[in-house]
C-alpha cells in the first residue's frame, strides 16, 4: 500500500537518526530524573505507528443484531447469534495470516480452539456459558480479512442491559478505555428511553461513534425512513446534551442480506444491504487513526527536541557566568519553582476540597434520588391497589413498569447533576491548568518538570495507566494529542464525571432489567389490598437501597480517582523539587562544568533545530 510506505518515511528517518537520539538521551538525562531514555520512547511510538490497533466495540441492547452484523462485515458465519441472550464474553477480531481462535481466561491461562461458530459457542454463547461461569476474560480471533489489515480490531460484546448482570458489566468494563464505537440501534421500535440514556452516557466518553441501524428483512422502506428520521432527532438531542457532535449520519444495513450476498457472491444483494457504506466508514476510521498517531509522533519528538534545546541553552548561558553568578542563578530558579509550587498547592487544595464537598453533595443527592424513586413507586402502586388490583400478574407487571420508570428518572437526574458538576469543576480546573501553562512558559525548571511528567506518562508507569483509565478515551485519541500529559491529566479531569454518568447509565439500564426479572419471579400474591400494601414494602425498600448503593458507590469511586490524580501531581512536584533540585545539585555542578564546550553546544543546538524544522 502506497500510503503505508509514505507514512513510515518520517518515522524511519527519526528512528534511524542515531545522532539525534543520542543527543536527546544525553541532554534529557540531565533533567528528567526518572524517565526512560527518549530513544526508547520514540522507538515504542514508532512501533505503534507501524502496527497500530484501533479497537472498535460494537454496542447495543441485547438481541439488536450485533453479532449478526459483525458476521456480515467479516463475510463469514463465525460469531454465534441467536434470538435469546447469546454473546456473554468479549470477542476481539483482528487481522492474522493464520486463522485462529484463542480463549483467554481470567486466571491468566489460555487455550487455542478451532475457529468455527460451533467451537466458539462453548465459551461465547450464554446458553453454554451462563453468565460467563467459565470465567473467560476474552476471546481473540485472527482472520485474514482485508478490512482488518490496517489494525482495525472489531469487538463483539454482550448486549448492554443484558439480563445477566455479569454479562452487562463485562461490556461496561471493556468499553471504559476506548475512544470509538459502533452503536447498533433499532428500526422498529425506535430508540427506547433506556437505550437513549445508555447512549447519552456512553457517547460522551467516546471521541467518535458510528451509528448503525440493523434493518430486518420485513421492514418497509417507509418504516425505515421514518425511524431514521426519528432516531436522528433523538441522537441530535443526545449530542447536544452530551456536548458531543453527531455527524447526522445513521448507516442503515441489512445484515442478513449482506451475509447472503456475500455467501452467494451476489454483488447486487450486497449493494442493496448497504454494507459497503459501513465498510468504507470503518476504513476511514482506520486511516484517521494512523494520521493521528503520526501527528502525535511528530509532536512528541518535537517536545523532546524542545526540552533538549532548552537544556543546551541553559548550559550556554551558564558557561558565560562566573561561579558566583551561577550560584545566585541556581538559588533564584529554586526559589521560583518553590514559590510556584506553593501557589499551585493552594489551587490544588481548593480543588481537592471542592471535590470532597461535591462528593458529599453527590452522596446526599443519590439518597434523595433513591428516596424519591421509592416514594413515587409506593404511591403509584398503592393507587393501583386502591383501585382494586390486588394480586397476581397485573400487579407484578405494573410494579416492574413503575420501577423502570422511576429508576430511569433517577438516572437521568443524576446524569444532569453530574454534567453540571463536571462543568463547574472544569472551570476550576481551567484556572489551575492555565497557571501551570504560564509557569511552564516562563520557567525553564517548570518546563523540565512538566515534560518529565509527560515522559513518565509515556513510560506507562502504573499511575499513568491508571489515570488513562480514569479519563476514559485517553487510551487512544486523546492520549495522542501531543499535549503535555500532565496537562492532559489535569485538563481532562472533567472526563471522569462524564464517564461516571455514562457508566452509571449502563449500570442503571441493567438494574432495570435485573429488577424486573427478579420481580417477575417473585410475583406479589397477597389476596387483600392491605396485605398487598404490606407485601410490597420490603420490595420498595430493596429498590431504594439498590438505587442508592449503585449510584453512590460508582460516584464515590470517581471522586476518589479525581483526588488521587491531584495528589499524584503534587507529590511528583515535591519529589522533583527535593531529589532533582536539592540533593542532586552537587553532582549537577560537576556535570555542568564538563558540558561547557560552547562551540559543541552551539553545534548541538543547531543540529536539533534543523531536525525540528524537518519535522514540520
Ligand atoms: N430477520 C432478521 N433477523 C436478524 C437480523 N439480524 C439479526 N437477526 C436475528 O436476531 C437475533 C439476535 O441477533 P444477534 O446477532 O445474536 O444479536 P446480538 O445483538 O448479538 O445479541 P446478544 O449477543 O444476545 O446481545 C438472532 O436470532 C438473529 O438471527 C436481520 O437482519 N433479519
Ligand atoms: Mg451477540
Image: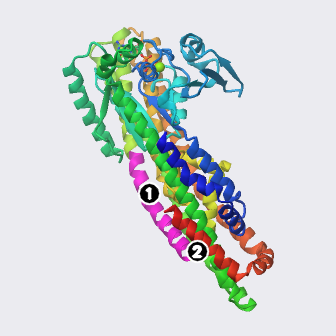
Q: Which residues are magenta?
A: 417-442
Q: Left or right: where does residue 394 sit relative to residue 179?
A: left
Q: Main SS type for the magenta part? A: helix
Please name the residue that numbered disc 2 is placed on: 340
At 59% from the left and 16% from the top, the residue drawn is 115
Tell me which corner region of the image, top left, top right, bottom left or bottom right, holds residue 395: top left
Q: Secondary structure at mark 1?
A: helix
Report x, y in % for residue 233.
Answer: 25, 36
- Position of residue 4 relative to residue 186, above or below, is below
Q: Left or right: where does residue 110 sit relative to residue 62?
A: right
Q: Residue furthest left?
A: 222
Report x, y in % for residue 466.
Answer: 61, 47
At 54% from the left and 13% from the top, the residue drawn is 117
Which sits in the foreground, 256 or 581? 256
Q: Left or right: where does residue 23 sit relative to residue 517?
A: right
At 48% from the left and 42% from the top, the residue drawn is 2
Upstream in the sequence, badge 1 or badge 2?
2
The reply to whether residue 359 is visible in this rendering is: no
Mark 2 and mark 1 in contact (Cβ < 8 Å)?
no
Local packing at callout 2 (Cα closer than 10 Å; few below 14, some 14-19, many 20+) is: some
How many numbered markers are drawn? 2
Local packing at callout 1 (Cα closer than 10 Å; few below 14, some 14-19, many 20+) is: some
- Position of residue 381 relative to residue 337, above or below, is above
- Position of residue 579 relative to residue 230, above or below, is below
Instruction: Give the numbered dot on residue 126.
Output: none
Please name the residue that numbered disc 1 is placed on: 426
- Position of residue 403 relative to residue 216, above or below, is below
Residue 611 belongs to magenta span: no
Q: Left or right: where does residue 247 sit relative to residue 151?
A: left
Residue 422 belongs to magenta span: yes
Q: Secondary structure at mark 2?
A: helix
Which sits in the foreground, 484 or 421? 484
Amino acid at each position: 500500500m502506497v500510503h503505508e510506505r509514505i507514512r513510515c518515511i518520517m518515522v524511519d528517518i527519526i528512528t534511524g537518526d542515531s545522532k539525534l537520539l543520542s543527543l536527546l538521551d544525553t541532554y534529557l538525562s540531565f533533567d528528567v530524573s526518572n524517565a526512560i531514555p527518549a530513544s526508547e520512547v520514540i522507538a515504542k511510538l514508532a512501533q505503534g505507528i507501524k502496527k497500530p490497533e484501533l479497537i472498535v466495540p460494537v454496542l447495543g441492547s441485547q438481541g439488536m443484531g450485533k453479532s449478526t452484523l459483525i458476521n456480515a462485515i467479516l463475510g463469514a458465519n463465525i460469531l454465534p447469534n441467536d434470538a435469546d441472550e447469546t454473546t456473554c464474553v468479549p470477542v476481539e477480531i483482528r487481522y492474522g495470516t493464520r486463522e485462529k481462535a484463542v480463549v483467554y481466561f481470567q486466571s491468566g491461562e489460555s487455550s487455542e480452539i478451532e475457529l468455527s461458530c460451533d467451537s466458539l459457542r462453548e465459551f461465547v454463547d450464554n446458553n453454554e456459558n451462563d453468565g460467563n461461569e467459565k470465567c473467560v476474560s476474552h476471546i481473540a480471533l485472527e482472520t485474514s480479512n482485508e478490512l482488518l489489515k490496517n489494525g482495525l480490531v472489531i469487538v463483539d460484546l454482550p448486549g448492554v442491559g443484558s439480563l445477566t448482570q455479569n454479562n452487562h458489566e463485562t461490556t461496561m468494563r471493556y468499553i471504559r478505555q476506548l475512544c470509538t464505537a459502533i452503536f447498533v440501534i433499532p428500526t422498529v421500535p425506535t430508540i427506547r428511553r433506556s437505550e437513549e440514556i445508555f447512549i447519552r452516557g456512553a457517547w460522551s466518553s467516546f471521541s467518535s461513534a458510528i451509528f448503525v441501524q440493523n434493518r430486518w428483512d420485513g421492514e418497509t422502506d417507509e418504516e425505515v425512513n421514518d425511524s431514521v428520521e426519528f432516531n436522528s432527532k433523538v441522537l441530535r438531542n443526545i449530542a447536544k446534551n452530551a456536548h458531543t457532535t453527531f455527524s447526522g449520519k445513521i448507516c442503515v444495513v441489512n445484515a442478513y442480506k449482506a451475509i447472503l450476498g456475500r455467501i452467494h457472491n451476489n454483488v447486487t444483494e450486497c449493494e442493496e444491504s448497504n454494507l459497503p457504506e459501513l465498510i468504507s466508514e470503518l476504513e476511514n476510521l482506520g486511516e484517521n487513526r494512523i494520521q493521528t498517531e503520526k501527528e502525535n509522533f511528530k509532536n512528541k519528538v518535537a517536545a523532546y527536541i524542545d526540552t533538549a534545546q532548552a537544556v543546551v541553552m541553559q548550559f550556554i548561558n551558564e558557561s558565560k557566568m562566573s561561579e558566583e553568578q551561577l550560584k545566585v542563578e541556581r538559588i533564584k530558579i529554586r526559589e521560583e519553582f518553590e514559590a510556584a509550587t506553593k501557589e499551585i498547592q493552594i489551587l490544588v487544595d481548593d480543588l481537592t476540597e471542592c471535590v470532597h464537598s461535591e462528593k458529599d453533595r453527590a452522596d446526599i443527592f443519590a439518597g434523595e434520588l433513591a428516596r424519591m424513586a421509592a416514594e413515587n413507586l409506593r404511591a403509584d402502586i398503592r393507587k393501583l391497589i386502591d383501585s382494586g388490583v390486588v394480586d397476581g400478574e397485573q400487579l407484578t407487571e405494573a410494579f416492574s413498569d413503575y420501577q423502570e420508570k422511576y429508576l430511569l428518572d433517577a438516572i437521568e437526574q443524576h446524569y444532569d447533576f453530574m454534567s453540571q458538576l463536571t462543568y463547574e469543576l472544569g472551570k476550576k480546573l481551567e484556572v489551575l491548568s492555565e497557571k501551570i501553562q504560564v509557569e511552564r512558559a516562563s520557567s525553564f525548571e517548570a518546563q523540565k518538570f512538566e515534560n518529565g511528567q509527560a515522559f513518565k506518562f509515556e513510560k506507562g508507569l502504573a499511575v499513568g495507566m491508571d489515570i488513562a483509565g480514569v479519563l476514559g478515551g485517553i487510551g487512544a485519541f486523546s492520549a495522542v494529542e501531543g499535549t503535555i500529559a500532565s496537562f492532559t491529566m489535569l485538563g481532562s479531569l472533567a472526563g471522569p464525571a462524564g464517564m461516571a454518568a455514562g457508566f452509571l447509565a449502563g449500570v442503571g439500564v441493567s438494574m432495570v432489567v435485573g429488577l424486573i426479572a427478579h420481580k417477575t419471579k417473585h410475583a406479589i400474591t397477597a389476596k387483600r389490598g392491605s396485605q398487598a400494601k404490606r407485601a410490597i414494602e420490603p420490595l420498595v425498600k430493596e429498590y431504594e437501597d439498590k438505587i442508592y448503593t449503585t449510584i453512590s458507590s460508582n460516584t464515590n469511586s470517581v471522586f476518589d480517582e479525581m483526588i488521587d490524580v491531584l495528589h499524584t501531581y503534587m507529590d511528583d512536584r515535591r519529589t522533583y523539587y527535593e531529589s532533582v533540585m536539592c540533593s542532586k545539585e552537587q553532582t549537577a555542578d560537576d556535570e555542568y562544568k564538563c558540558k561547557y564546550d560552547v562551540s559543541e553546544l552551539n553545534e548541538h543546538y543547531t543540529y536539533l533545530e534543523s531536525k525540528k524544522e524537518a519535522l514540520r
